[in-house]
Amino acid sequence: MKIAAVDPFYLRMPDITTAADGTQDTLLVRVRTDTGLEGWGECDASPLVSLAVYCCPMSHGNIINIRTSLIGETLDSPDDVLQLSEKVLRNGLDIQQIQHAYSGAEIALWDVIGQQLETPVYRLLAEMSDTSDSAHPKLPYASVLFGDTPEATHRIAAGLREQGYRAAKFGWGAMGKFGEANDIALVQAAREGMGTDAQIMIDAGVVWRADHETAYRRAEVFAQFSPTWLEEPLAPDAIDAYGSLTKKRPRVPIAAGEGSDTYRTAEDLIVHGGVQFVQIDAGRIGGIMPSFQVRQLAERHGIQYVNHTFKSHLSLAAALHVFATNPDFDLLEYPAAGSELSQCLVRDPFRVASDGMVRVRELPGLGVHVDTEAIRPHLAPVRIEVGADTVFEQPPLV
Ligand SMILES: [Mg+2]
């Protein structure tokens, strides 16, 4: 079959705030074939900057947009997805946002080829890598922001506990901004709200930049509340500082990696940064295949792979297929407090089963369906003109 259309859609909530909440808007990508199949992907990136990568006029031979690279191409096998990825990345060699932007299309291509072959994406990945194709359940951890105060954080934690979550991650907000005593009080509130038998994770939201000594002291002092990890205490590219921090073996394991925009960035964090949990967002790193390659690297290094997902359940589906077949990587970041847009985006979100676990679906492709009716009110139609030419005009969302 041939790729007939590649369409990016920009969606947003009525009001965009400075909160560290990436669900306020989004960029979806729809791929259609000449045989009538349709696949979807979602980018976790700056939506309008990424949209430009789909339609910007050619600048020279190393700046050719994603649509030009894909439309008209043959798509009959997983190998074709890999070859198309190579072509897109080669044509966009000098487009710095290319992996972020391409993630949506790459995920959509896997959705299409899975439907064509009537196979879930995770099984296609298992076949390609000659590994087990049994899927394993994941323990969802609710992913929320810290409250503004320890009291507010306690209320959030207790609420999650009431909803039945056995694990939750608290991040960003006041962490690292008002001194050590407040940082400790925030973590204590999260622990007490969730209870002693739950898992808690702490996301410092890159607050200590390259200051690995403060990060180490916090990891040591947080150890009394037994968090599963301390996430992103340092800036994404502070690889040397991560190396210095992890060499001291703090009592709380260090997690990072959501900012990885290439396989190589993640490899750097694993090999030189020494992280014990690598967190990969398929919607940033270039899609499902580079995420899968980081998973394989984590397996070789004996560290844990975890998804980073702070978008809709379309992104969650892509994330699940990447590591469904590894029984040891058993934690799943599960968006629990996103915008109305992120919550209505698919018709069939992943529910937490009665055993408290989430499972990948035994359906062709990604196994979720975008609810175009529900998201249409959030569509912000984009039209780009350059001189007398219309470079891009959003197609209808039908
Ligand atoms: Mg994070």
Image: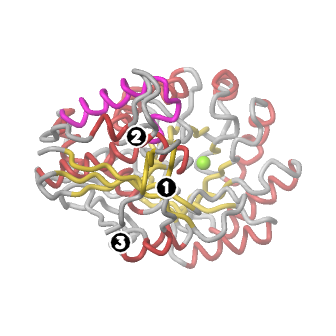
Q: Is residue 90 magenta?
A: yes
Q: Is residue 356 above or below residue 91?
A: below
Circle 1 — which element? strand
Task: State yes or no: Cβ of the residue under disc 1 lies below 8 Å from any atom of ligand 1.
Answer: no
Give the label on residue 371, or none. Answer: 3
Instruction: Locate residue 134, reporting x and y percent.
Output: 20, 50
Compared across the picture, whether 365 is left or right of 157 comes to left
Q: Is residue 42 above or below residue 249?
A: below
Cα distance in 3D space between marks 1 and 3: 23 Å
Relative to the observer, which residue lies in front, 172 or 187? 172
- Looking at the image, which residue is at 17% across and 33% down? 130
Identify the coloring: secondary structure
Query: Would you call the spot at circle 3 few (<14 residues within 10 Å), some (14-19), or many (20 or more)?
Result: some
Can you name the residue that lies furthest to the front here? 388
Q: Specify which label sits upstream in the sequence, 1 or 3.
A: 3
User: What is the span of residues highlighted in magenta in the rendered image?
Assistant: 79-102
Instruction: Locate residue 230, reporting x and y percent.
Output: 65, 44
Query: Would you call the spot at circle 2 few (<14 residues within 10 Å), some (14-19), or many (20 or more)?
Result: many
